[in-house]
Image: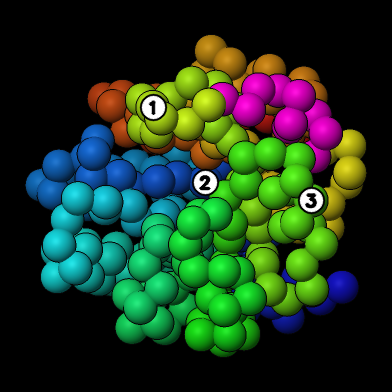
Amino acid sequence: MVNPINQPATQRSLSETRYYGILDTGYVAPGDWIDKFHALIRGGAKTVQVRAKKETQDQRRELLAQVVRLAASLENAEQPAIIVNDDLSLATEFPDVGLHIGQDDTPPQEARDRLGPGRILGLSTHSVAQAKAAMDLPAGVLDYFAVGPVFATQTKPDYEPVGLELVSWVASQKPSLPFFCIGGINRSNAHQVAAVGARRVVTVSDALLDNDTAQAVRETIALLPK
């Protein structure tokens, strides 16, 4: 096991992450991008993903560049890990930026080969088989995986919720990789995923649509085991 002191700063941020924030252009207007980023950090997010599904490549690049600049301006202890969603080529343009991929995107080993070592790589899983496959990958391919959508979510309305059963099964396996619960999680149900063994969550609309995003993040973290 790598000594945390010797880990790259981005991987230390990931290992310390209990709340994983997503800056999603479906919920955050470009003019609010900076304020929402700072609010996520003030609330306690140690990892922030840039998700811009409907934007052009140039627009996505500028949004990611903006977040990278903001992160670099923070004190070292506050700097989050920055992840880009489903855009391998864009991730490789920015030193230290990580990548999150889905089941239908670039295969994990290929993504790792192109990213190289040291960058964070995460994978979405939606079933026992997919979660097991993620856990069975060779060491060094993935840095984390996500489990969901736990509950129904408007962010991905076409996805069937996996329910708490999958979260409970994954937690029972005691995976060596961090896993994050995602999908329909908010302050009214985060205690449910915590009760079946989750320690880390992702929320999107619950925090981004709140006028006090930082407080929404703090309240979510307070519902999770330490």
Magenta stretch bounds = 161-170
Q: Secondary structure at mark 2?
A: strand
Query: Which of the two residues, 168 or 226, is positioned nearer the viewer here?
Result: 168
What amino acid type is highlighted by mark number 1?
Pro
Quadrant of the rendering where the C terminus is positioned: top right
Residue plotted at (68% across, 73% down): 141
> Which amino acid is tagged 2?
Tyr
Which residue shows up at 59% across the image and 35% down it? 148
Whichever of labels 3 and 1 marks the residue nearer the N terminus, that label is: 3
- Image quadrant in which you'd find residue 43: top left
Measure how far apart labels 3 and 2 are at the Cα level: 22 Å
Quadrant assignment for the N terminus? bottom right
Element marked by disc 1: loop
Q: Residue furthest left?
A: 31
Q: Locate residue 221 relative to residue 207 in the image: left or right.
A: right
Q: Secondary structure at mark 3?
A: helix
How would you classify the magenta stretch by its main secondary structure?
Answer: helix
Mark 2 and mark 1 residues within 8 Å of each other at the beta carbon: no
**4 versus 104 height, above or below:** below
In the rendering, which numbered label is found on residue 195? none
- Asked if residue 154 is positioned above or below residue 43 in the image, the reply reads above
Name the amino acid type tagged 3: Lys
Q: Quadrant of residue 14?
A: bottom right
Q: Per the image, is 169 magenta?
A: yes
Which residue has dot 2 on it? 20
75 inside magenta stretch: no
**Residue 157, labelled with which disc?**
1
Mark 3 / mark 2, whichever is N-terminal? 2
Q: Which mark is residue 132?
A: 3
Is residue 222 visible in this depiction of the protein? no
